Structure formats: C-alpha cells, structure tokens
Amino acid sequence: MTPTQDQREWPDDLKRCVDFHGHICPGLIYGYRVALEAIGLMDLRRAVDEEIVAICENDSCAIDALQVLLGTAAGKGNLIIKDYGKNAYTIISRTKRRSFRFSRTERYAYQGSDQQIYDQLSGALDKGIASKEDQTALKQMKINDLLSRPFRDIFTTKEMNYDDPLFAPLQPSEPCALCGEMTMTGKMEVLPDGRRVCIPCRLNLIAV
Ligand SMILES: [Zn+2]
Ligand SMILES: [Zn+2]
C-alpha cells in the first residue's frame, strides 16, 4: 500500500496553510517550502505591513502558503503576481534589505523508496485509467516526497541585489465619467475626448 501521511502529523504551520487554501496539494507544498526557506535565510517574522514582499512568477496554489506564512497578502500590495507560468518566487525583506529568488529548474521526479508503486500509478494516470483512489494516492505520494526532500532538490536559491521594492501605491479616486463609480486615478484611462473612465467602461466602448 502507498504510505499516506495522516493530516494529524502535519506541522502546525502547514495546517494553517491548508486551512486557508482549502485543500492540500503539491502546489501548496512548493509555496510552503519556499516560505520556510526564506524565513530561515533572512530570519523573517510574518509581515504585519509590507516588511516582506513576494514576487510570484505564477498564480498557482503556492501563493497561498506565502500569504499565510509570510504575510505577503493580495490585499496589502506586497504580493506581486507576474504570471510568467514559472515555479519561481522572489522574497524580499525590506527590514533585512535582502532578497532571494527561488526557482524550480527541473521537471518533477519522484524519489521515494516506493518508486515502483509511483511509476505504476503515474503510468495509469498517463493512460487515463487511474481510479480516483489512484489519483489521490499519487498526489499524496508527491506531497510526502516534496515535504521530505532537501530544499536544494526542489528549488535553486539565488541571492539577488536588494532593490527597494515600491510600496503599494496610495492614490486618490475620482468618479468614472461614464458609470460614475469611484476609481483609483492610476487605473483610469483617458478617452480621445479627454473624459477619464474606468477600465470596464473603456472595454465596453471597444466591444460595441
Ligand atoms: Zn491547491
Ligand atoms: Zn466606469
């Protein structure tokens, strides 16, 4: 049988990530490992304000672990998503004036002791004949593998030049000339006749 890690064995910080994210998945584990590594390297405490900034090069499950553990949250402006479709994250500490980029450079390859079972299950998945139980078991094996591997097996780590990241912009709002809704000025677009409108209104104008 495939070994499954009981969720009671998960560390508390991982449980908090799963609570927030809704489920456990390999993507969340990537973010969890990156967050812990960044905390260790820069001796970080969870950001109350914008002491830490995360630049994520994808919009996957991993980001939620960063939000929980680093306090780099979508609503605070210190979570920057550059959706390049890469499993890569730059974590910046304003207080430590340091910055690290973590990047996954290799295709995932299972390294557990029960390689044969893994190969069987993933072979079944490739052929489209994996049962729901097979899929769950496969996911669980991946998760356990990603949790137990040395970090350097999963991500390369590179210290980057510290470059003071911009703080989240605070901007005044003004009403859109078409719908009248208050809109941040920096997000408004100017029509040829000079009226300033919100993005949805401008997109509507193009569509008609
Ligand atoms: Zn997920
Ligand atoms: Zn509008």
Image: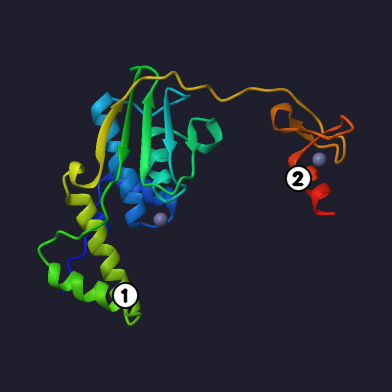
Q: Residue at x 31, y 41 (%)?
A: 103
Q: Quadrant of residue 26?
A: bottom left
Mark 2 close to ligand 2, CB under 8 Å: yes
Quarter of the figure with the N terminus:
bottom left
Provide the secondary structure element on which disc 1 rests: helix
Q: Height in image: 39 above or below 207?
A: above
- Please give the label number shown on residue 93: none
Provide the secondary structure element on which disc 2 rests: helix
Q: Residue at x 25, y 55 (%)?
A: 8
**Can the viewer see residue 170?**
yes
Question: Mark 2 to mark 1: distance in Å?
Answer: 42 Å
Report the front residue among 36 and 80.
Answer: 80
Marks 2/1 in contact by CB < 8 Å: the verdict is: no
Callout 1, which amino acid?
A: Asp
| Left or right placement of residue 80 versus residue 142 in this view | right
Q: x, y percentage for residue 86?
A: 39, 47
**Can the viewer see residue 69?**
no
- Please give the label number shown on residue 200: 2
Report the front residue among 127 and 50.
Answer: 127
> On the rendering, which quadrant does ligand 1 occupy?
bottom left
Q: Quadrant of residue 16?
A: top left
Q: Quadrant of residue 144?
A: bottom left
Q: x, y percentage for residue 123?
A: 25, 76
The residue to which callout 1 is attached is 126
Q: Residue at x 19, y 72 (%)?
A: 119
Report the front residue among 17 and 136.
Answer: 136
Q: x, y percentage for residue 171?
A: 68, 23
Q: How is the image coloured?
A: rainbow
Q: Residues within 10 Å of mark 2 (few under 14, many from 20)?
A: few
